[in-house]
Amino acid sequence: MTDERLTDRCRPTRNRRFSAPLCPIALLLATCLVSSCSGNHSTLDPAGPEAAKVAQLFYVMLVGGAVIWIGLVSALIYSARKKHQHSEQTAGRVILWCGAIIPTVILCALLSYGMWLMPAIRPWVPDDQQVRRVEVTGEQFWWRVRYLDEAGSVVFETANEVRIPVGQPTHFSLKAADVIHSFWVPSLGGKMDMIPGRTNPLTLTADREGTYRGVCAEFCGESHALMAFTVRAVAPAEHEAWLAERRTSDPQDAEGLAVFLNNGCGACHAISGTAASGRIGPDLTAFGERGTLAAGTLPHTAEDIARFVAHPGRIKPGVKMPHFGMLPEHDIKKIAAFLKELR
Amino acid sequence: MVELGNFSPEERAAQEERLRKVWKTPGGWRYWTSVNNSEIGLWYGVTAFVFMLFAGALGLLMRAQLATPNNNLISAELYNQAFTLHGTVMMFLFAVPIFEAVAIFLLPSMLGARELPFPRLSAFGFWSFLLGGIFVCGSIFFNAAPNAGWFMYPPLATDKEYAGIGADIWLLGLSFIEVASIAAAVEIIVGIMKCRAPGMRINMMPMFAWYLLIVAGMILFAFPPLIAGDILFEMERMFDWPFFDVSRGGDPLLWQHLFWIFGHPEVYIIFLPAIALMAMIVPTFSQRPIVGYSWIVLAAVGTGFLSFGLWVHHMFTTGLPQISLAFFSAASEAVAIPTGVQIFVFVATMLAGRVIFSVPMLFGAGGLAIFTIGGLTGVMVALAPFDWQAHDTYFIVAHLHYVLIGGMFFPIVAGIYYYFPFVTGKKLSDAWGKVAFWLMFVGFNIAFFPMHFSGLRGMPRRVFTYPEEFGWDLFNLVSTIGAFIFAAGVLTFVIDIFRPKPEPETRNLNPWNAGTLEWTNDPSEDWGMRSVPIITSRYPLWEQENLQADIEAGRYYLPDAKSGKRETLVTSVLDAEPIQCLRVGGVSYVPMISAMALGGVFIALTFHWWIPTIICAVITFIAIIWWLWTGTAQIPEAEEVDVGLGQKLPAYVSGPASVGWWAMFITMVGDGTAFASLIFGYFFYWTVHDDFTAGSAGPGAFWPMVALVLFVIAWLLTIAARALNEKGPAGCRIALVAGIIVTIAACLAGLAGPYLQGMDPTSNVYPATVWVIAIWTVVHGAVGVVMLAYCLARSFAGCMTAEHDQDIRNVTLYWHFMAFTAVVTFAVLGLFPMVST
Amino acid sequence: MKSFIPREVESLWTLFTAPTVWAMHFIGCYAAVAVYCAKAATLDISFDTVRLALGGFTIIALAVIVLSAYLAWRQWGFGSGDPPHDEPTRKDRALFQGFATLLLSGLSFVAVVYAAIPLIFIAECQR
C-alpha cells in the first residue's frame, strides 16, 4: 500500500471527531511497515522458518485486528451521533452477537491456529537426534559460546558470536551463569530465557546466509542494554571448514602476546594455544575474526579496543572487567593491535 | 408499603443539628484524625494522584534519555532506578490506591449508606499507604531506589551487590501497602454486601458496586501470593534462606510464579474499577438505564475468575513445557470474551439512548478506542508463538500502555470530570477539558503507537540506550515528542482542577441529571445521606418520584442521631432487608498511630535496626488491642434502636449477621491464600528436584503429628468455649484457659520437628521451606493465643457476655481457619516426605 | 435428582458455580501436565494417556457446567421473561440471578472448551 492512497482515503473523513488523529497513525503505520523490511534485527524481516511463520501469524492478526478496531470505532461514532434511538432489543442483540458470539468464534479459530503453530515451529527433537549443538551461557553482560560434539563435550569456546550453517537446524542449550538473561535473534525466531540452574533448549535455523543480530531480552543489570551478539549464517561447507580450523590457533604477533600476558590479561581471558587460559571473561581466541567488540557494543577497531581496555566501565557501566587505564598508552595500543589481528 | 416519616421544620432543624454534630469533621490539626469516608477518600485520591505525577515525571525522564541513540543524559543506574520506580509506583501507588480512593469516597453514597462499616480501617489503610508510598518514592533521592525492575526477578534482585537496600525498600514498603490494600478489600466487600440501602436487592445494585465487589474479591486472592513471595524473598535477603539460590536447591522461577499469580489479576484489578466508572457515566450521558445489566455481571465475574488463569503468559519464554504454556494461551484468549461483552454493553447503551457528548464521554470513548488497540495486541501476545517474539520488547511496552492508559487512566480522568461536582459542588471546565483530551489523546498515540514498530523491529525493553543503526532512532524520537504532548495534556487537566472556579449560581446537586443515588448527597454536609431511602429502582433519581425531597426532608430511615453515635443500616445480602443499626467508629488517633507504628516496623526492618523494630512492633500491638477493645463489639445502651419509619432494629448482632464476622471471614480467606501459596512453593520444589529433601531427614512424622493433634484439640476447646459462653462465663473461661495452654504446647510441638532434627534453613531450600511453613503456622497459633486471651479478658471485664458474644464468635471463626492451616501444614511436613519416596 | 437440588437456592454463591468448575478444570489440567512433564522419567505413563485422561476430565467439567446452566435456566423460568429484571421484587431478583448464572455458565463452557484445544495439538512435553 502506498502512502498516497492512504492519504486519499483519509481525506473525506478528516473533519470528523474521531478520525482526525487516525490519519497520521495510518500513515505512520504504512511507513513503518514498509520501511521495516530492512536491517538484520527485525521480526518482520525473517531469515528462518520460525520467524517467518510468526511474522505470517502477525500479519494475519494485524489485518483482523485492524478490521475489528475500525468496526468498533465506527460503531462508537455511529451510536454517539445517530439521530434516533434504537430499540432495547436491537441493542441487546448487539451485545449477544458482537460482544459474545462473534468474538468466541474468532478467538477459537485464532487459538487453534496458534496451538497448531507451537509444535510446528518448535517440534520435539529427542536428544540423540540433535547433531549441531551449541551451548550458550549468559553472563553479565556477554555470551559464552561453546561448540559441543555429539557426546555433549566441549570442542572449543568462543564468545559473543555464533556461526551456524544455513538450512540446518542448530540446537542451542541455553544457560545462565549469574542472573536471568534471554537469548533472542529476532530475524531467526523467538526468544528463550537463560535461567540459573536450568538448561533451556532452543532450535534455530537460518534460511539464507547473512549476519543476524541478537540481544539479551531479559533485564539483567546495569548494562543490560549493552548485551548483544551476532549470529553468522554461512554455507554448510564453509561452516565445517571453520569448525575444523577453529580447533587450532596460532597467534602471529609474539610481542603483542607478551604484553597481553605480562599485564595479567590471561588471568581472565583465554587464547587457545597460549599461556592465557583464564575462564572468567570471554575467550579471545581468534578475536580478530569478530565483527564487534564488547558484546555488540562497539565496532571492531583497534582504537575502540584500546578505549575499552583502558576504561571498560565508561563504555559498559557495571562491567566486571577492571579498568587498565593506568597502563602506559603504548602497552594498551600494543594489546589492541594484537587483539585486532588475532586469528 | 411503609408510611414515610413527616417532620415539622423545627424537628428537622433539630435533627440536622444532631446529625451535624455527630458527623462533624474536626477542625485545625485534628482534621487529620478524621475517619469519615469523604475525607479519607479524598486524601487517598489526591495522594495517589500525586504519586502518579511523580511516576509520570520519571517516565518523561526515561523518554528524554531515549530520545536519541547513545544518549547519556542520565546514567544507566539512574535509568534502571527510574524504570523500576515508574512501574512500581504506577501499579502499587497509583492504579490500585486510586480505585480504593474512589470506592471509599463513592460507595457509601451509591449504596445509600452513611458510612462504610469500618471507617477506622479505611483511615488505617490510608496512613499505611501514605507512609509506605513516601518511603518507596523517596528512595530515589538518595540514589537508593529499587533498580531490578518492578517484577524484581531473583537472582538479580537478591544480589546484594547489585540490588542493595533498594530491593528491601521495595519488598518491605510494598508489603506494607499490600496490607493496606487487603484492608480496603475487606471494607469494600463487607460494605457492598451488608450496607446497602433497604430494598437495594442484588439486581438493583449500581454497576460500580458489582465491579467493586468482584475487584475486592480478586484482591483477596491476588495479593496474598505476592505477600507469601515477599516473605520468601526477604528471608533470603535478610537471613540467607536459599529459596531462589540455585546452588542450594532454590529456583528463581518460584518467584516468577508467585509474582505473576498476583501480577496478572492485578491488571484486571486496575482495569475493572475504571470500567465501573464508565458503567456509571455511559448511562447518564445516554439518558437511559444501562442495556445488559446481567451481561455486565457476567463480564465482571467472568473476568475476575479468568484473570487467575493467565499468569504464565508472562513466563512464555521461561522454557516451561509447551503444553503448560498452551493452557495459559487458551485462558488468555478466553478472557477477551467478557472484555468484549463489556465494551459492547456500552455501545448498546449508547445505541438505545440519546447521547450527550460531554467531556466525561469524550475521555470515556477516547479511552475505549485506545484500550481496544491494547486489547487486540493483547489477543496477539496471548498466543505463545507470537509472544516468543514480542515478549520483553517495546511491542509489550506499547501494548501495556494502551491497555492501562486507555483502559484505566482515561476512564479515571472521565470519572474525575464526572464526579468533580459531586466532590466540590462545581463543574470542571468543558473548554479546558477538550483541550486536555485532545492533547492527551493525540500525544498518547504519538508516544506509544511507534513503540509497536520499534518492538517488532527488535528493540528490547528496559534498555537505557540503544545503537543507532537499526532504525529505532526515529521511532524513539517520535515517542519522546508524543510523551511530552501527552504530559502537556495531563498538566492542562491538573491546572483545570486547581484553578479557582466561580461559585455556581444555583445549587444543583445533580448537574448531569444522573439517575443513581449518590447524586442526592450534598457535598457541603458531612453526614452523607440525610436519611437512608428505600430503593425500588436501579436508577432511583430517574424513576422514584420525589426521592431527593423526601431524603432531604428526613422522611426515610435514620433521619436523626439521638444516640450521639455514628449510625448506619446493615441489610441482608440478597434482598437488602434491614437487620441492624450499626454503630461505626468515629474520629480517632488510633488508626494513624497503628499505621505509623506498623510502618515503623517495616522501615526499621529495611535497615536491620532490630531494637526500633521491636519497639514499633510492641506499639503496633498495643494500639491494635486498644483499638479493638474500645472500638469493637461495644455493648449498646439499649438493645434496640429506633431507626425511623416506625421500625426498631438491634444495635448488637453477632455471628454471620454481623459485619465483624464477615470481615474476619474475608481476611482469613486472604490469609488462607497466602498459606496456599507457601504450600504451592513446597510442592513446586518437589517437582523441580529428583530428591527434593536433598538427603535431609526432614522434621520426622512424630512431632508434626503431635502438633496437628494439639491444634485440633485447641480448636475443639475454642468451639466449646463459644458454646459454654451461652450458658454462663465460668465454663467458657475454663475452656479458654485450656485452649491457651494447649495452643502454646501445639506451637512448641510444631517447631520441635525441624528444631530437634537440626534442620539448618540456610543449608538448602528444603529445610528453609519446612521452617517457613512451620513458622507461618506457629505465628498463627500465637495470634490464636492472643485472641483467646482477649476473649478471656473481655469476659472478665464484662464486655463479653452470653448475649453479647461477638468476640468469641469471631475468634471461633478464626480458629476454623487456624485448624485447617495446622492440619494441612503438619500433614504435609510430616507425611509427604514418606509418601513421595 | 430433584430431592438433591432444592427448587430454589437462596444464595449469592450459586452465581460462581460454573466459573469455579472452570477454575478446577484449569488447575487440574495445569497441575497434571506440570507434574507429569517434571516427573515423566519416573512415571510409567505415556503423554497420550495424560491427554486422554484430561479429555475425560474436560467432559466431566463440561457436564457439570451444563447442569449448572440447566439449574440457572430453571431459575430464570426457562426464559419466560426478558431482561432487564429490574423490578423491586424477590421474583425479579431471582430471575436476574438465574439469567446472570446462565450467562456465566456459557462463558465457563467456552473457557473449558478453549482449555481443551491444546490437548488436541500438543503431543509431547517439548519446550
Image (tube, coloured by chain):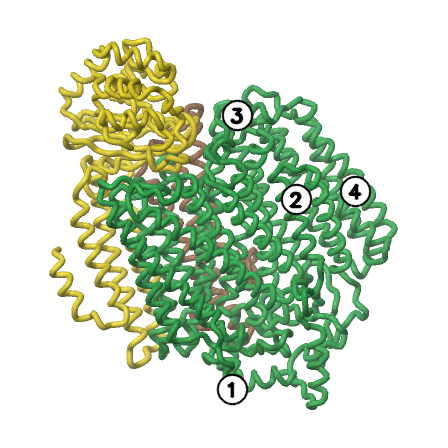
Chain colours: A yellow, B green, C brown
Contact, CB < 8 Å: mark 2 with mark 3?
no
Residue type at numbered disc 3: Phe
Identify the disc placed on residue B225.
Answer: none
Q: Is residue B98 visible?
A: yes
Comes first in the chain, label 4 or label 2:
2
Q: In the current view of this chain or complex, which residue is farthest to the right?
A: B730
Comes first in the chain, label 2 or label 1:
1
Residue type at numbered disc 2: Val
Can you tell which quarter of the image residue A326 is in?
Answer: top left
Residue type at numbered disc 4: Gly
Q: CA distance from mark 4 to mark 2?
A: 30 Å
- Say few, some or many: other residues with alpha carbon within 10 Å of mark 3 (under 14 / 14 to 19 / 20 or more): many
- Say few, some or many: other residues with alpha carbon within 10 Å of mark 1 (under 14 / 14 to 19 / 20 or more): few
Point out the image quarter for the C terminus of chain B. Answer: top right
For the point 23% across and 46% down, the residue is A57
Q: Is residue B268 above or below residue A21?
A: above
Q: CA distance from mark 2 to mark 1?
A: 51 Å
